[in-house]
Amino acid sequence: MQAVQASALNGVRVLDLSRILAGPSATQLLGDLGADVVKVEKPGEGDDTRKWGPPYIKDNEGRPTGESAYYLSANRNKRSIALDIATDAGREALHQLLSQADVLVENYKVGGLAQYGLDYAQLRHRYPRLVYCSITGFGQTGPYAKRAGYDFLIQGMGGIMSLTGEPEGTPMKVGVGIADVMTGMYAAVGILAALRHRDLTGMGQHIDISLLDSQIAWLVNAGTNYLAAQEPPTRLGNGHPNIVPYQVFDAADGPMILAVGNDAQFRRFCEVAGLDGLAQDERYACNAARVAHRDELCGWIQEALGQRPRTTWLEQLEAVGVPCGPVNDLRDVFNDPHVQARGAHLRMPCAWAQGGELNLLANPLKLSATPVTYRLPPPRLDEHAQQILADWAGSH
């Protein structure tokens, strides 16, 4: 049996000059995998999201700490140091850290670090092994490169809002900053690929990743549907553009999801629902026909599902292998026995928080040989300055 290692990225040092969500999400993921992540923040202010509340975390005396729950979501497994890179002393300290770094992640506006001598073109020869990841709204090139990018704007410009919401309603953004989060995921993957290349060749590289590029990439089937048909998809509410029935319906006591993925599942659903005739009807017998006759079919299904409570439907449909489920609020989610068994709720020890712990979302990766580790709670601003300088700058 293979021995369990502490973490996959042990020994990898990451300088995190990013803030808000995309960059911090990427670096938190690297930290969870074992990287030593140093969060470089502006003195006196720090990451913008520290103040994005309420809710704010309370200290052991029950007083608000000024650290928001939003900030906690993307900043564990990091140490914080406050450096003013606009000063000679701040830049000198940063270069001491750069001399030991494997990765730098930044989300300044295009050209924003050049004035400090800290863009990739200025660092690549001094630190040839450095993997330098730039996260921006629109990328390093193109007519929009100089614009600031925010998740909400990118969801609108990147098309996801045109697909989200009821057909006759207002275009709707996703309820979390998903463009930021997915950009962070792509950034982490790109960094890992660049580290692999660096390990093989000895050379670092520049990663140019943007929110808009990432947003368009994760349009997935909706994007390729458009490219194939050259017809912009319309909003379908909770419906699916390519599969029917695959949406929310109202049971007698609340909403539920019916997610029929093939014709056999549709026939089994019809048997349970007492709608056997629909499975034999040529208008509904195959998925392509069901898509073409979506509205009338879903009307029949809604009428049937409204006759019984949700728990009855879920039990009967699950028993015959028809995919279905409840529409949970977050209380339901974290009380779900399966969610609890999988450890999605992380209670992390934290000396400065009320009760000595923080409630966080766990990393979903389950690695058998190099498991995710939770070593450090999200740091207070400049909490680890002396420790970082001793660990990194003293390791020449």
Image (cartoon, helix red, strand yellow):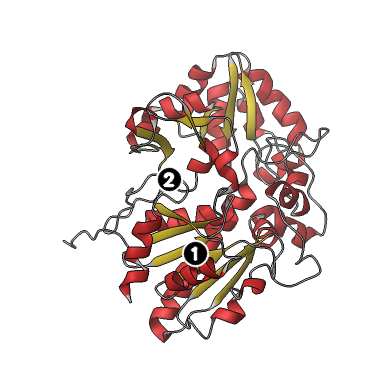
* 274 on left or right of 342: right
The residue wearing badge 1 is 189
Residue 370, labelled with which disc?
none
Gap between marks 2 and 1, in whole Å?
22 Å
Direction left: furthest residue? 1
Type of amino acid at the residue the image marks with label 1? Val
The quadrant in which residue 335 appears is: top left
Does residue 35 appear in the picture of this structure?
Answer: no
Q: Nearer the viewer, residue 246 or 274?
A: 246
Depicted 381 relative to depicted 350: above or below? below
Q: Provide residue 241's location: percent of width, then percent of height.
A: 71, 45
The spot of residue 37 in percent (x, y) is: 41, 59
Query: Which one is nearer the viewer's eye here, 129 or 97?
Result: 97
Label number found at residue 378: 2
Q: Residues within 10 Å of mark 2 (few under 14, many from 20)?
A: many
Query: Quadrant location of the C terminus?
Result: bottom left
